Amino acid sequence: MNGREIIRRCGLLAQQTEEPGHITRTYLSPPMHEVHRLVRSWMEDAGLITHVDAVGNLRGVYGDGPRLMIASHLDTVPQAGAFDGILGVMIAIALAEQRPPCALEVAAFADEEGVRFGVPFIGSRALVGDPVMDECVLAAISHFGLDPARIPEAILDPEVKGYLEFHIEQGPVLEALGAPLGVVEAIAGISRWELRFEGKANHAGTTPMSMRRDALACAAEWIGLVEHVAQTTEGLVSTVGKIEAWPGAGNVIPGLAIASLDVRHALDEVRERALNVLLDGAEHIARRREVKLSGESRLEQPAVALDFEMVEEAVQAAGFPVHRMVSGAGHDAMILARKVPAAMLFVRSPGGISHHPDESVLAEDVDAALAVGAQVLREWRPE
């Protein structure tokens, strides 16, 4: 397979969807049966011995002895593009087709996005001995025709000594640099909080500005601080992606506002310091405005350092410029890094578009990724 054929196959898989007219394929939904049939046939044509494990991951092995796993995921977000996750699986199969000099395992994870049950990484977590055992997940496994009792058998084989993932960048950096590929040196840590601002609802026309306890105005001032801290802290991104206000009438001062907070950085100490600044700032603003503040942590995910040298040397040897970067999004590589050295290579996303039907890749960039992958397999030695 070359880049054009890989793109064609991604397009074929995009037709397997829960939502006609859109690409929507969640964990073990009915379209995954046909996806498995297609991908399994391609794996076997490439010389892989295949099976589906008890959480729905499609896996194939080439060769004997210590091996490198190359993997990504087959599920999507609602109304997605054709390449997020799926491109990495197709590149892995294409590399197996080349009959590499080392043993290889290709894994197509059944869930990374976490859309169906609100829990991400169901596929890769089973491999590291941290399976999702929620009753609804186990029921879905049974309904798909798999046996939840065999989930422990999905764990990573001791012969797997390293992990590599190819993935679209999902951002605009490589395009701005004119670079086809990016070497991921770390996956950013994430702090997610929910903040609750409680003021006092009152008539919008009769309450003087000096006597208001406007919960939404308080939240808005704090949102300005969220943006300012990120703009003045190198490498930090922080986002208020959701805000709700009550009672929600145009002629009533909001008495309650609830806002989300998402803070990310490749260094945990920087992220934690910024988070403390933002929480302290929210308290200060609320106190000055006589608004009650409460907050709750929703997620604390530490940053993950990746084995960037594994792919950096291969990028150089294949004749491409090296650009190290941090992934602001989570990936299966961060799960596998708990057990084995893990690396990632980003492929340029035209327009920086992802999680959208307009998501795309360039055939020449996919060919570049294949060249780097082949170089990795030529040089890879188990630790």
Image: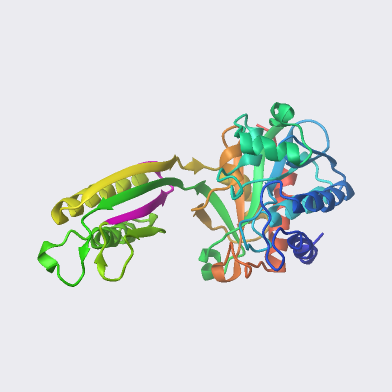
In-image side of 48 versus 114 (left or right):
right
Residue occupying image coordinates x 63% and y 68%: 357
Say which quarter of the image contains residue 236.
Answer: bottom left
Residue occupying image coordinates x 52% and y 54%: 324
**Nearer to us in this view, 355 or 248:** 248
**x and y percentages locating residue 212 in the rendered image:** 15, 62
Q: Is residue 260 magenta?
A: yes
Asked if one can make out residue 153 in the rendered structure from this viewpoint, the answer is no
Quadrant including the N terminus: bottom right
Q: Is residue 57 magenta?
A: no
**x and y percentages locating residue 307 in the rendered image:** 57, 42
**x and y percentages locating residue 328 in the rendered image:** 49, 53
How many numbered callouts? Answer: 0
Vertical placement of 306 versus 239: above or below?
A: above
Say which quarter of the image contains residue 181.
Answer: bottom right
Asked if one can make out residue 373 in the rendered structure from this viewpoint, the answer is yes
In-image side of 63 versus 258 (left or right):
right
Residue occupying image coordinates x 26% and y 48%: 277
- Tell me which segment is drawn in magenta: 256-269
Quadrant including the C terminus: top right
Say which quarter of the image contains residue 360.
Answer: bottom right
